[in-house]
Structures are given as structure tokens and as C-alpha cells.
Image: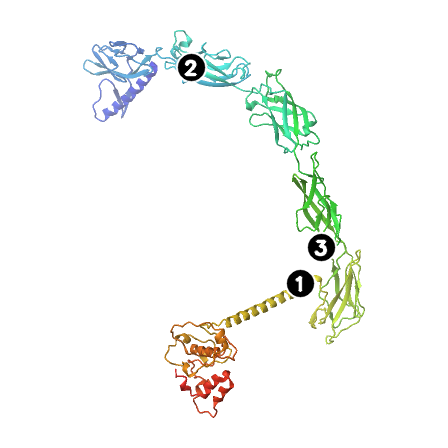
Amino acid sequence: MMAWLQLWTTGLMAIMSVSLAVVGDSGLPAVEGHVEIVKKESHPVLFRQKRDWIWNSLYVEEEKPAPAAYKIGQLKSSQRVEVKSFKIEGEGANTIFTVDQKGDLFVTRSLDREEKNAYHLTARMYDGNNKLIEDSGDFVVQVTDINDNTPVFPGAYNGSITERSTIGTKVVEVRATDADDPTTANGELRYSLTPHGDFSAFEIDSITGVISCKINSLDRETKSQYVVVVKAQDMRGMASGSTSTTSVTITIADTNDNIASFTRKTYELQVPEDHKLNEKIGTLELEDRDQIQNKEPIFSIPTENSKVFSIELSSPNKDGNLMLKQALDYETTSSYTFTVQVRENLRNLRFPADNANSAVTTAQVNIKVLDVDEAPVFSQPVYTFTVEEERIVSNVGTVTARDPDKAKKSIRYSILDKDCPISINQLTGQLSTLRMLDRELEATHMFQVKAQEEPSGLESFVKVNVIVQDINDNKPELTVDEIFVCENDLTDTVIGTLRATDKDDQPASFSFSLASESSNFSIKDYGNSTADITVKQGPFNLDDPKDYSVDVRIADGGRPVQTSVTKLAIKSCRCDARRIPTQCKAGARRMGVSVHALIAILLCILTILVIVILFVMRKRYQKDSLASLKNSGEIHEQLVTYDEEGGGEMDTNGYDVSILSSACHDGSLLRHPDRHPHPHPSLYAMVQKPPQHAQPTACKGDMAVMIEVKKDEADHDRDGFPYDTLHIYGYEGPESLAGSLSSLGSSSTGSNLDYDFLNDWGPRFRTLAELYGVDAPDYYHQY
């Protein structure tokens, strides 16, 4: 250390010498006696003066009382100077550390190494004239350590080790700290286990503090936790050293070192016979001292009963759940007795189990099956029968179900589908057809049959398929493109190819022939369900009015053979050289009409007839309503349509009769009732007419007045028929621009006829006599 300080001081003096040389060259005052400058030519040469400080080792002991300052060393120099003084600078200079005229260095108070273990100072020496003799020199005051601190643990420790671990297995490492100097015995610690803890199974490394296992028989089931006390002591563990302790909790981790054991030797269980498959019947409890995660039992049923029962692990206890694999039947087997075994999964069992001799690894299981009233059971899961079409079959097949119980109750059968063409005998389950089946309409009939016990009502269902077998019951149908003959077609010219189809499922071998030989065409059958139509004799003339056709007979070759005859129309055409028609005579192919087409046509005709009948009935109803309206004796406020000619153009489409209720009693067109005595009222007026109440005075139009007059005359006419409604009125519209054309206004003109004789004809002609036989002004006023 002193050598390092001396080297550092030498370098510092060299730098200061260079600095002083530079200052001298610049004209600044220089310090005398420190630097000697030798000039050679223009380059100065600097010489460093050898350092004369003589250092002794300076140490101070920590925690040493200082009631008075005490000397720890002396500052010395090799120069011989009689009068001199010292000055120090740096950490604690002139406070903690002081120096006198002799260079003795003193400490004024107690120091703590843990607070600060070294102080860096600088010293200078002056002569009596206060001239610097010795430049600054650095030195260090070391604070020596004493054992004034005790070891310290950060806290309690926790560790874990698996049971049955081998000797030397590390558990946990403890570590304490000491504030004293670790390079001395004051800070060197040693660890040990104290008797205050359970250290029978563990040991500790005195230097590293690692706690390890010293036995291989740790058993969690015997003791699951240990607490040990660790002591740390400085001074390398000597008795004079300071100590401290801490506790370490060691947990023993579980491993699979115990065999699962049944809690009972016999298990009694009951289960109903209708118990669902793959569901639990009961639980076989186990005892295992290991924890759940290390409980790995394996069950087995070594007898034939393993086909009926199985055992699965329960959650979360990992006991044995007895499961049902096969349906039970009380009537067949009412009880089961078998043995169950359990063993441990040995792949994790590293040591012999402690309870290997006492574990119950086999147990007897007794299961009692309980009787349950069960639904009927069909003999088959699905029934399939076949029946020929177009036949009434009394025995299609039989559906059978039985009562699985000992009671053997009676069973009744029924079909759920109400529209099913198949019926079933309620007692025997025999199926029969209700009508003839048609494979072409529906090839398979699917329905469900219900079997129900009596009187319990328990029921089961089964699916039944009735497949309709095909027979050759459909006639072949002709399939052909449009056939035409050209004018220039010669004998044996092929004019078309015939094919046929059949709705039956059976493979058909169609043959074609002519139904009549009178035509000018022949059919050439190739025997492969096709044929050609050829010309017997040509050519043809398009102007010939005769239409050509052939009757084609088709046989399908089935059993029985079905044949059909179709009239095939042949068009006459004018063709080009490639036999492409360019002009054809009007004609259409006529073919046989099927039954379905006839039914469709009849339905259309029937629909039209129903519509016509409904329309006629509606018209009649409207007329009856109109007649009842006319007979009601009511006078409506508006007339819309007239059947006879009107008096003016404005009355052609509709008449505004509001004037009937708007005209006031101004004397216009009012009949004078005193001019018409009625000595003999009619029988209708006396019998049918109810007493008339006095009508309130109101404004009435001309038409209304005339109607009332007419009604009064009719009421008092004993010989007249009692009309309730007048349909035709001799009155013209007053708004006509052309004027009235009625003869009512011409009665005052000159006439060669005297109509008074009409009074002698009877009451019916009295009105006419009044109109034409008397001057109009006597009865009417101009409006």
C-alpha cells in the first residue's frame, strides 16, 4: 500500500513540476527550491526531485474510547529542517484527525469500521518561514475491526423432501450475514443444529449451511413435518464468538408407498333390473394412507361376471364405482356374487409398502337384482315384410312382443299411422292389407306398431317396413320423336325410330308391331326394344288431303304380357336433299290419352260447372234481394239507372232526385183534393192501411206530391189491385235543356177528342180522363 502511495505521489510531483515550468516561461512567479530548469538551446529540461516522505503504517482500532486524543502515528521526512510545521487535508482532517508541530497524528474520537473502514488524507511540511518543504503526500488511516456484530438470519426457512429419500439428499440451504470484517475471524461464520429442534433425521454443513437428510426411512404417514433450529456463530465457531439462531420447517412430501385396501371384506348391493347401462350401481370404498394424487388403485373382476359388471375410479376419492355393462333380467338371474381384486400401480412404488401384509386386496360383492314391471319386448328390433301389389293380402306377417316379467300379461297391438294401408290384429299382431297397394305410387310403407300391456299400460314401439313387390301391371308407353314422311321418300325408307317405357320395376323386353296392316307403313323390330318405321310404297304427294297414321302395338314381354296400342300420327312434308323438312302439311300426332289425363280433364270440367252454378245462384240471390227491396214500400233518395228514356240528356246516366225533398209548398203541381171526391173508399184502404198519423209539414217536391196522389187513388180504388210500389212515372226532368216531351203539357191545346167518356170505363181510366178531359190549369199550376 505504501509503495502504491509513493508511486502515486511521484507521478503527482512530476505533473506539478511540468506545470511550474510552464508558469515560469509565461512570466508568472514560480515556487523556489522545487523545480530546477536547465536550458539547452530552446528546449527546457525538467528534473523531478526525489520524494523525502517517510511513512509509517497508520492504523486505528474501531470502537476504542477517546476521552482524550491519542496518537496513532507520526509524519516524517528525510530532509533535515530544524524548524518545521505540518498541515493535513482530506477525510476527517483537523476534526477526527489532528497533527502537531512534531508531525504526530492524533485521533480525537471513537471510530466504527462498519461505518467507515479507511480515511484518505494529504500532508504538507513547511519550514519556519512557512515555506513549503515537502509537497503533499497522500496516506490512509485504516480502521481495524473488532468482533462487535452478531450473525443475522434473513428469517425463517422452509424446505421439502420426498419421503423415502436417500441419505445426503439436500433439503434447504441457510445463510446468515455478519457485519464484521469477513477477512478476519470476526466475520467468519459456522453453522450447527441445536438440540432445541428435531435434528434426528437431518444434518447441516457447518461452512455452507446446507441441510441434508441423514436417513433413508422418512415416512410421511408417520411424521409429515420436521422443525430444526440452526445456529450461526462467528469467530469460526469458537466459544467466544457471537451466535444467532433460526428455525427451518421441513415438509415431507408424499410418494406412493402404501397399497390401497378395501374397507370391508363384503359389499352388499341392490339394483333394479331396468338399471341403465354404464351407470353406477354402488361404490367400493378404499383406504390408502397416501395422498389422493398418489392413490393409483387398479381393480379387476376375475370371474365371468366381468362381462356384466366393471369398476371405474370415482372422482375425487379414487374409490371403485361398480358399473353395469350388460342389461339385467330378474327373470333370468336374480342375484350375482363375485370377487373383486385391487392392486397398486407399482411403477411409482420405490420401496416396499408398509401395509403390504395388512392390506385387504380382495373383497366379495353380493348383488341382488330387484324385479321391475317392464314394458313389452319385441322379438326383433325392426320388422320387414314383402307383399305383392294389386292384391288384398290377409297375412302380410306377424309382429310379436312378450312381457319379460313373470306375470306374462296380455298385450294388444296397434298401428300409430291412421292413414296406413296396413291393419294389425290387436291380439295376434298379424298384419293385413286394407286395400290393394300400388308399387308405382309407393314402393315401401313404413309405420310403427305399438305393443301395450294390459292393464298396466306399459308400451313399446317397433318400426315395420312393408315392401311392395312389383308385378307386370302397367302397359308399355310409346316414346318417339316427331315422325314425318317426305314427298320423295321411297319404299323401305326409314322415317323414325320407336322406343317404349314401362312404369313397372321388372325389366321389360319390348316388341313392336302394327295393330292394322291397312296403312302404307311397316314396322321393323330389331329385338332390342327398338324398332323402325319404314315406308311400304312411295313417293307421297303433299297435296293429298289424306292424313297418315299407324297403330303401333307394343308388348313388354312380362308375365302376364301387357300390350298397348297407340295411334301415331305421321306428318307429310316437303324435304330437301338431306331429308330436312322445309314445308309440312298441318297435322298433329295423335296418341292415346292416359287415365290420369282423362281424370284431370274431368276435374277441370267439373270445376267450371261449379263456378257457373255459383255465379247463377249469386245472380238469383241479387234479383231476390232487389225484389224484396222494391216490395218494401220505401222511397229512396237517389235513382241511379232507368230502363226507359228520360226527358233530357242530363237524366241519361243518373237522376238527382234531391228536388223531391227540396221543393217547397208554393202551390206548384199540387193536386186539389176537393176536386176529387171519393164517395166509396177501396176495400184495401179500409182493411190494409193502418191509421195514418199526421205528418209534419215539410217541403215536398213535385214528384213526391204526385206519388202520394197516385197512392191515394190506388188506396181508394175498390176494384184495383193494391200495388205497393209504382215503377214507372210519367214525369220528365225539369232540368232538361230540350224541354219536356211529355204529353201532359199538351192537354190544354186544341184537341178533336173528348176524353170524358173515360170516366165511364172505371176507376182505372179516371186518371187518364182527368189528364186529357179537363183543362190543365184547373188542376196544375205552372212550376
Residue at image position (55%, 14%) is 217
Identity of the amino acid at label 1? Ala
Q: Is residue 389 above or below residue 450?
A: below
Say which element carries label 1.
helix
Number of the front mark, 3 or 1: 1
Q: Please indicate whether residue 278 sits to the left or right of residue 175 in the image.
A: right
Residue that carries the numbered disc 2 in the rendered image: 246
Q: Residues within 10 Å of mark 2 (few under 14, many from 20)?
A: some
Q: Quadrant of residue 408?
A: top right
Instruction: Tell which residue pokes out farthest to the right in this image.
Output: 517
Residue that carries the numbered disc 1 in the rendered image: 600
Identity of the amino acid at label 2? Thr
Q: Quadrant of the C terminus?
A: bottom left
Residue 126 on image: x %, y %: 22, 15
Q: Quadrant of the N terminus?
A: top left
Residue that carries the numbered disc 3 in the rendered image: 440
Identity of the amino acid at label 3? Glu
Q: CA distance from mark 3 to mark 1?
A: 19 Å
Residue at image position (56%, 22%) is 294
Q: Residues within 10 Å of mark 1 (few under 14, many from 20)?
A: few
Residue 227 on image: x %, y %: 47, 14
